Amino acid sequence: MSLVEQPEYQIVTAEGSIEIRSYGGMIAAEAEVQGERKTAINEGFRLIAAYIFGANKPNVKIPNRTSAPACYGRSAGSIRVHAEFFLQVAAPPQLTHR
């Protein structure tokens, strides 16, 4: 049993230990940062973490219902940090800083 809160889902079909699930809406947050790879990754994770922990409008902490943010290179000198969230709200909180 996971200690991380899990999003609600419906099982579409199941066979043995395999389930096909349908999840509700998902919101993705991404930060694209320019610069040297290690520095850019750290800055991208910092921006995503700040957003998750309340640097948003209306200053709400976003429940972590997913794995850790992923990062990947978009182009030379550019890193994108990506995180997905299952939220039961009509719209995601707005970003308040950069």
Image (cartoon, rainbow, N blue to C red):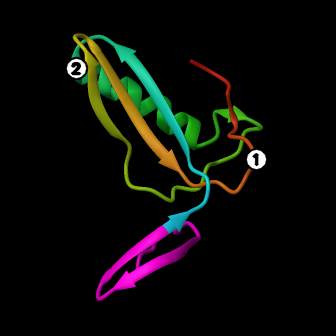
Residue at 54%, 35% (x, y): give it: 50
Q: Nearer the viewer, residue 97 or 30?
A: 30
Quarter of the image with the N terminus in it: bottom left
Looking at the image, which residue is at 56% across and 18% down? 98
Residue 81 is left or right of residue 55, and the answer is left
Label 2 residue SS: helix
> Does residue 34 appear to the left or right of 89 in the view shown?
left
Of pointers 1 and 2, the one earlier in the residue sequence = 2
Say whether residue 88 is left or right of residue 31: right
**Amino acid at dot 2:** Arg
Magenta segment, which residues? 1-21
* Residue named by callout 1: 90
Q: Is 8 drawn above or below residue 74 in the view shown?
A: below
Q: How many marks?
A: 2
Residue on which disc 2 sits: 37
Counting other residues with Cα less than 10 Å from the Cα at mark 2, is it few (<14), some (14-19), or many (20 or more)?
some
Residue at 61 percent across and 49 percent down: it is 62
Single out the mark in the foreground, 1 or 2.
Answer: 1
Q: Magenta stretch containing residue 8, yes or no?
A: yes
Q: What's the residue type where badge 1 is placed?
A: Ala
Q: Residue at x 49, y 75 (%)?
A: 12
Residue 18 or residue 8, whichever sits in front? 18
Q: Quadrant of residue 36?
A: top left
Q: Residue 66: image x %, image y %?
A: 45, 56
Quarter where residue 41 is shown: top left
Q: CA distance from mark 1 to mark 2?
A: 35 Å
Kindly state the secondary structure of the residue where label 1 is placed.
loop
Give coordinates of residue 27: x percent, y percent.
57, 44
Q: Position of residue 70 (x, y in %)?
A: 33, 40
* Residue 88 quadrant: bottom right
